[in-house]
Image: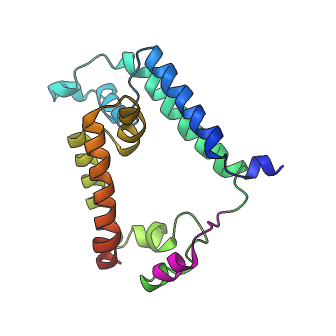
Amino acid sequence: MDFIVQPWPWYVAGPLITLVMLLLYYFGKNFGVSSNLETICAIGGAGRFVDFFKFDWRKKTWNLLFTLGAVIGGFIAFQWLTPSEAIALNSQTVQDLAELNFQNGGAQYLPDEIFSTEAIFSVKGFLILLIAGVLVGFGTRYAGGCTSGHAIVGLSNLEMPSLISVIGFFIGGLVMTWLLFPLIF
């Protein structure tokens, strides 16, 4: 049963991702999870108000199904293939989190200080989620895709805009981690 509860090693997961990318390339499909929001808006009738959403969303049904499968797969992995919510964090990371008022660092994937009902419905929590959502939405649209879309699909297709985007993502992550995160928490 150890096979079920251990993460798959890179030499299994990597080639499987590669296989998926090759199949998408072979069938002429361009993968991107964030583009599903455009499709959902088109399904909801946003094309009546904004020309950007006037397209045949039925041609992108496969991508909606792929994303639904990813959500279902994530649920199955969390519910039945995860031995516990504890995360193996470096002791220095746990100490750094404690200095930022995060208690029990590594005890669970989603810390209560950010994701509990009390935190989400506080003024600070609501503003953090609102501002983060706007920034992620704007950044995804401005960059022409999300982090995984650029890092996995764009880089595998040797696209220069994806390389520039991924470099920007890493710089943004470093700025957030070392400069903004300590100010917020």
The stretch in magenta equals 85-96
**In the displayed structure, would residue 129 be above or below residue 184?**
above
Q: Residue at x 30, y 32 (%)?
A: 159
The percent coordinates of residue 38 (x first, y second) are: 30, 32
**In the displayed structure, would residue 124 be above or below residue 134?**
below
How is the protein colored in the picture?
rainbow
Residue toward you, 47 or 78: 78
Q: Is residue 92 visible in the rendered structure shown here?
A: yes
Q: Residue at x 41, y 42 (%)?
A: 148
**In the displayed structure, would residue 64 be above or below residue 177?**
above
Q: Is residue 123 visible in the rendered structure shown here?
A: no
Q: Residue at x 67, y 50 (%)?
A: 7
- Asked where in the image residue 173 lies, by quadrant, the reply is bottom left
Is 155 displayed left or right of 95 in the figure?
A: left
Q: Is residue 17 magenta?
A: no
**In the displayed structure, would residue 162 be above or below residue 78?**
above
Is 47 displayed left or right of 85 in the figure?
A: left
The percent coordinates of residue 36 (x first, y second) are: 37, 32
Is 69 displayed left or right of 142 in the figure?
A: right
Disc tally is 0
- Asked where in the image residue 104 lies, by quadrant, the reply is bottom right
Residue toward you, 50 or 150: 150
Q: Residue at x 67, y 46 (%)?
A: 8
The percent coordinates of residue 150 (x first, y second) are: 35, 39
Q: Is residue 88 magenta?
A: yes
The percent coordinates of residue 185 (x first, y second) are: 36, 78
Residue toward you, 134 or 4: 4
